[in-house]
Image (cartoon, rainbow, N blue to C red):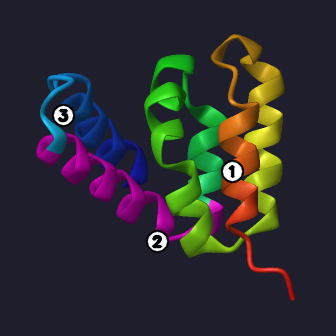
C-alpha cells in the first residue's frame, strides 16, 4: 500500500543529515518512484498527507511531474498549496508544472 511505503521512505528521509547528499538522493529516488507508479493513487495519497509529509515530498514535485505528465497532479498540488499556505509551495509547483510536455 502506498501510504505504508511512503511512511517508511519519509521516515528514512527525515533522519538524513543535511550533508548526506547520497542518502538524500536515494530517498528522493524512492519517493519519486513510489509516487510515479500510479497517478490516481498518488493524488489520493497526497490529499491525505499531513503538512510535514507534504513538505518533504515537495522536494521532488518536479521529478514526479516529469514522469506522470499529469495536469491533475498539478491541480492537486495547487489545492494543497491553498490548504497549507505556510509551506509556500507555489514556486515548487510552478517548476513542477514546467516539466509537463506541451502538445
- Residue 22 to residue 98: above or below: above
N-term-proximal mark, 2 vs 3:
3
Q: Residue furthest top?
A: 86
Residue annotated with mark 1: 95
- Residue 27 to residue 81: above or below: below
In the image, taking residue 38 as reference, residue 21 lies left or right, namely left
Q: Position of residue 20 (x, y in %)?
A: 12, 34
Residue 23 is a magenta residue: yes
SS at mark 3 in the image: helix
What secondary structure do most residues of the magenta stretch adopt?
helix
Q: Are the residues flagged by discs 2 and 3 in contact, CB closer than 8 Å?
A: no
Residue sitting at x 56%, y 31%: 49
Front of the two marks 1 and 2: 1
Residue annotated with mark 3: 12
Q: Position of residue 2 (x, y in %)?
A: 40, 53
N-term-proximal mark, 1 vs 3:
3
Quadrant in which residue 69 is drawn: bottom right
Residue annotated with mark 2: 37
SS at mark 2 in the image: loop
Quadrant in which residue 34 is drawn: bottom left
Amino acid at each position: 500500500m502506498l501510504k505504508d511505503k511512503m511512511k517508511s521512505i519519509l521516515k528514512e528521509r527525515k533522519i538524513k543529515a543535511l550533508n548526506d547528499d547520497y542518502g538524500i538522493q536515494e530517498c528522493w529516488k524512492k519517493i519519486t518512484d513510489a509516487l510515479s507508479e500510479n497517478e490516481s493513487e498518488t493524488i489520493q495519497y497526497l490529499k491525505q498527507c499531513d503538512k510535514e509529509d507534504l513538505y518533504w515530498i515537495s522536494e521532488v514535485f518536479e521529478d514526479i511531474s516529469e514522469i506522470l505528465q499529469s495536469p491533475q497532479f498539478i491541480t492537486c498540488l495547487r489545492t494543497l498549496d491553498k490548504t497549507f499556505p505556510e509551506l509556500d509551495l507555489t514556486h515548487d509547483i510552478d517548476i513542477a508544472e514546467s516539466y509537463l510536455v506541451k502538445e
